[in-house]
Image (tube, rainbow, N blue to C red):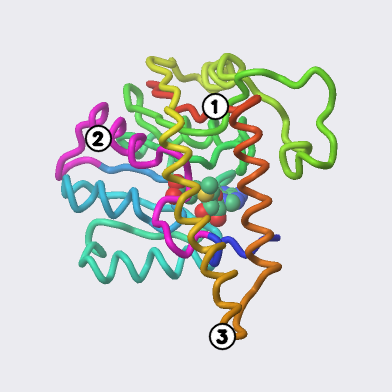
Amino acid sequence: MPDYARIYARQEYLTPGAARTVGIIAERVRPDEGTLLLEMAAGKGEAAAHLTSEFACQVLAVEPHDPFVHISAAKFWHFNLRDLVTLVRAKGRRLPVRDESMDAAYCIGGPSIVGLEPALRELARVTKPGGWVIVSDIAWRTKPEKPLGPDWGWLAEATPTTAAEYGAAIAGSGLTVEEVVTHPLEDWDEYWRPMLEVAAEAKSASATGGADIFFADEIESLIEIEQRGQREYLDYVTFVARK
Ligand SMILES: C[S@@+](CC[C@H](N)C(=O)[O-])C[C@H]1O[C@@H](n2cnc3c(N)ncnc32)[C@H](O)[C@@H]1O
């Protein structure tokens, strides 16, 4: 598995358009001091840090990957947010949370990694009736006519799911889709830029003998596949749904 903590060293959000999705969450949920939110696949905890510091709401942030749990914990400590964010190391398929206990739930860039249907089921389960469930993910604008070859890397292994199919899965988990936002290309560019900086740094360290060309190549080829995928097949989409 690639060293994601290193690849994402220069960015706080690990998903295209995450800041825009957080803006959508804030606009729809209108969190305040009495609001309890569940975040699945919290990554470096940036969304939870932003929402709690802006609105003084509470977030239960769930993330299983150790390096990201440590980075998030340090962030919540550094910004004095530990009274507002509870960080739990757990996987998305089985949240350690009671049914209908959250005012809203969100998962930015995670449902397809967790497993689409199980993730949506859990988000729906923990949310109170009438609460918002907001997710963002890759959706296929166009499906390939034949299976993608090995030059497509991880995309060749992915299950192509269109935004309509994704919306149907959300509806199948007992939620009503109210809005579908397709992110602009600039959201992808903003996501790739810091990774390309990490690759450039890994290469340029060659002058001092500290280069890691293999690592730089790994990042560049991951991004090249995503850029090709974005041009030909992929959108990044935020779905806003209600229980
Ligand atoms: C694309 S990142 C998104 C992180 C964060 N939401 C953001 O946008 O910055 C996907 C996250 O899912 C987490 N993840 C991977 N498998 C998971 C699982 N089974 N349950 C919950 N989270 C998982 C990863 O560790 C990673 O933090």
Residue mark closest to the camera, 3 vs 2: 3
Q: Which residues are magenta?
A: 8-35
The amino acid on which the numbered mark 3 sits, given as a three-letter code, is Thr
- Residue 18 percent across, percent down from the top left: 40, 41
12 w.r.t. 154: above or below:
below
239 w.r.t. 47: above or below:
above
Label 3 sits on residue: 208
Residue mark closest to the camera, 1 vs 3: 3
Based on the picture, tell me whether residue 32 belongs to the magenta stretch.
Answer: yes
Rounded to the nearest whole Å, what is the CA distance between mark 3 and mark 2? 46 Å
Based on the picture, tell me whether residue 182 belongs to the magenta stretch.
Answer: no
Q: Quadrant of the N terminus?
A: bottom right
The amino acid on which the numbered mark 1 sits, given as a three-letter code, is Asp
Q: Give the mark nearer the N terminus: 1 vs 3.
A: 3
Closer to us: 217 or 28: 217
Q: Residue at x 34, y 41 (%)?
A: 19
Q: Are marks 3 and 2 in contact (CB under 8 Å)?
A: no
33 w.r.t. 43: above or below:
above
Q: Give the mark nearer the N terminus: 3 vs 2.
A: 2
Label 2 sits on residue: 26
Label 1 secondary element? strand
Label 1 sits on residue: 235
Closer to us: 138 or 33: 138
